[in-house]
Image (cartoon, helix red, strand yellow):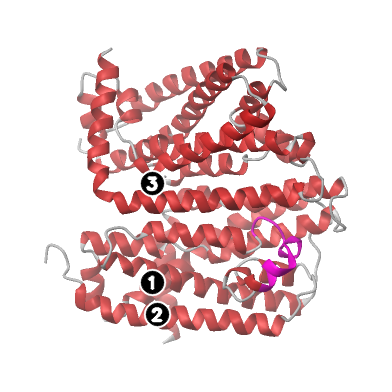
């Protein structure tokens, strides 16, 4: 089983290395947290908040890291394969297509990781002292939050991709999800700078757990109610997964493989 | 003149093809409005505590955002659909058909497509710029000139990046990258920490597309900067032309 799994992943890894130039530019397109960092660092130098500049640098670096682990594109793949009928061939294989897409994403992380490490080096040179070791506990919890965040993101993207069976075009919906993510996840600014009432509401939505939670954990910032946070995150992930499976079953009946 | 007419034909075909996707247009409108609100909120987080972003008043910062939104519209409606397609054409070999036509190939691949869902960005840009003009005053002539020059500069840079797909083939994201950097430059360049300020000015001249046009229109910088902008845009346009010719020499065509 393990051997099969490894072989499966290595095939997709080989496939993904073909796209390394593509992945590099995609990675570079995801540098937005660093630009927001640059503004907040400059503002903190002028004494806008009581946080020091380096804490902003740290926070946004980890937002970037969390985001890189969570990048998904399955909405595009699914809606493309539904439209041109390529999904039919995936259905012929003895494995649920979900696993193929999931393996694709995991293998891509393997290609992306070395490139991220180069960026870490550059960041370390530009902002010495921003990266500090906050202990194995923080590292583990941050990774766990990122992993759950990835799964949540993936299943949401999967659901939206499946909607292409009913709608003409579903990639716009993912863009909408992404915009909501940007606004409410702490991607633009640490959530502790948001008004109190807004924040209390946001913690019931899935968004803060995609960026703020892992970043704050990694940066060693105090996270109020971390236990509840993981609960809400796991709840949303489970919900997205159930929705993905339910929609898949309903969708298969609708799918009539164009050209077949 | 012939090229202008051709441009009109392209535009009409693209429009009629896209009208089928009215729902998408609506979706794009909602997304752009949401996103703009979010960016406004992001800006507001700075100003609520009395911090002036790099010495810019709120209305002036909105003007920068307006210019950035305008270019975002240019990107989404015009640059992205066309330049993304160059990569596709190289992969499928359909670039051959363009090269065979008695029309300048750079012109053809640059203007053939047009996506209506870029239009909502122009709407937001108009609102932001009108607000800034109404409150702190802008020179409309300078604004129009600066926007036009910034568009040309943006196009030339994006085209150079897109041209590299002739060698690398699988490179859809390269144009997106420039769009992403531009998106990050929605705030006045002086608000960024030093390394980023230098990057946005000298490595990728993105600050010349968003901050400088706004500065000239607001009168924070003299009209001499329009000349600088024109020189910069001209130089990059020329380079994009030379580079395209050079790349085509290396293009082996897919079918032969």
Residue B153 sits above or below residue A257 on the image: above
Residue at the location (57% across, 66% down)? A69
User: Does B37 appear in magenta?
Assistant: no
Q: Quadrant of the C terminus of chain B?
A: top left
- Write down the region rendered in magenta: A187-200
Discs 2, 3: same chain = no
Q: Is B122 on the left or on the right of B250, as rendered?
A: right
Sequence order check: which comes first, mark 2 or mark 1? 1
Residue B56 shows which numbered tag? none
Q: Is B94 on the left or on the right of A133, as rendered?
A: left
On the image, the x and y values in percent for residue B176 come to 47, 44
Please report, as a chain letter, where disc 3 is located.
Answer: B
Give the Cα separation between the discs numbered 2 and 1: 7 Å
Residue A243 shows which numbered tag? 2
Q: Are marks 2 and 1 in contact (CB under 8 Å)?
A: yes
Q: How crowded is mark 2: few (under 14 residues within 10 Å), some or many (20 or more)?
A: some
| Residue B188 appears anywhere in the view | no
On the image, the x and y values in percent for residue B139 come to 62, 19
SS state under label 3: loop
Please report, as a chain letter, where disc 1 is located.
Answer: A
SS state under label 1: helix
Residue A159 shows which numbered tag? 1
On the image, the x and y values in percent for residue A104 come to 42, 67
Give the Cα separation between the discs numbered 2 and 3: 34 Å
Please report, as a chain letter, where disc 2 is located.
Answer: A
User: Does A193 appear in magenta?
Assistant: yes
Q: Residues within 10 Å of mark 3 (few under 14, many from 20)?
A: some
In front: A127, or B25?
B25
């Amino acid at each position: 089983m393990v051997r099969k799994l490894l072989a499966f992943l290595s095939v997709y890894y080989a496939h993904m290395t073909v796209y390394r130039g593509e992945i590099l530019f995609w990675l570079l397109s995801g540098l937005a947290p660093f630009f927001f960092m640059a503004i907040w660092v400059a503002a903190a130098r002028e004494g806008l908040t009581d946080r020091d500049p380096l804490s902003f640098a740290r926070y946004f670096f980890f937002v970037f890291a969390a985001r890189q682990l969570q990048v998904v594109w399955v909405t595009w793949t699914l809606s493309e394969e539904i439209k041109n009928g390529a999904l039919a061939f995936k259905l012929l294989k003895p494995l649920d297509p979900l696993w193929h897409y999931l393996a694709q994403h995991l293998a891509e992380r393997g290609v992306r990781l070395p490139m991220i490490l180069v960026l870490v080096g550059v960041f370390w040179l530009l902002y010495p002292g921003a990266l500090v070791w906050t202990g194995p506990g923080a590292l583990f919890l941050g990774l766990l939050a990122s992993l759950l965040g990835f799964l949540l993101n993936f299943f949401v993207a999967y659901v939206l991709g499946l909607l292409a069976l009913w709608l003409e075009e579903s990639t716009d919906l993912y863009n909408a999800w992404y915009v909501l993510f940007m606004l409410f996840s702490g991607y633009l600014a640490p959530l502790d700078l948001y008004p109190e009432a807004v924040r209390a509401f946001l913690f019931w939505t899935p968004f803060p757990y995609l960026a703020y939670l892992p970043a704050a954990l990694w940066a060693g910032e105090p996270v109020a109610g971390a236990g509840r946070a993981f609960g809400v995150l796991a709840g949303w992930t489970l919900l997205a997964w159930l929705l993905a499976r339910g929609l898949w079953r309903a969708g298969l009946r609708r799918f009539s493989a164009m050209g077949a | 003149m012939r090229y202008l007419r051709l441009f009109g034909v392209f535009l009409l075909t693209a429009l009629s093809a896209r009208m089928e996707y009215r729902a998408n247009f609506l979706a794009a409108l909602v997304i752009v409005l949401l996103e703009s609100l979010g960016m406004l909120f992001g800006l507001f987080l700075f100003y609520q505590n009395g911090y002036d972003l790099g010495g810019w008043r709120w209305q002036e910062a909105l003007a920068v955002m307006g210019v950035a939104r305008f270019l975002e519209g240019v990107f989404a409606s015009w640059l992205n659909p066309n330049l993304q397609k160059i990569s596709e054409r190289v992969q499928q070999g359909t670039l051959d058909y363009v090269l065979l036509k008695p029309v300048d190939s750079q012109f053809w691949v640059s203007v053939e497509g047009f996506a209506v869902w870029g239009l909502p960005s122009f709407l937001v840009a108009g609102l932001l710029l009108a607000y800034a003009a109404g409150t702190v005053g802008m020179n409309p002539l300078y604004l129009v000139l600066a926007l036009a020059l910034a568009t040309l500069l943006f196009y030339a840079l994006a085209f150079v990046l897109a041209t590299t797909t002739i060698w690398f083939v699988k490179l859809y994201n390269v144009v997106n990258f420039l769009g992403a950097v531009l998106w990050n430059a929605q705030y006045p360049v002086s608000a960024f920490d030093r390394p980023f300020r230098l990057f946005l000015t000298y490595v990728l001249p993105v600050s010349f597309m968003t901050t400088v046009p706004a500065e000239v229109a607001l009168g924070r910088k003299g009209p001499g900067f329009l000349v600088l902008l024109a020189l910069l845009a001209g130089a990059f346009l020329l380079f994009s032309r030379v580079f395209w010719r050079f790349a085509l020499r290396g293009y082996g065509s897919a079918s032969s």
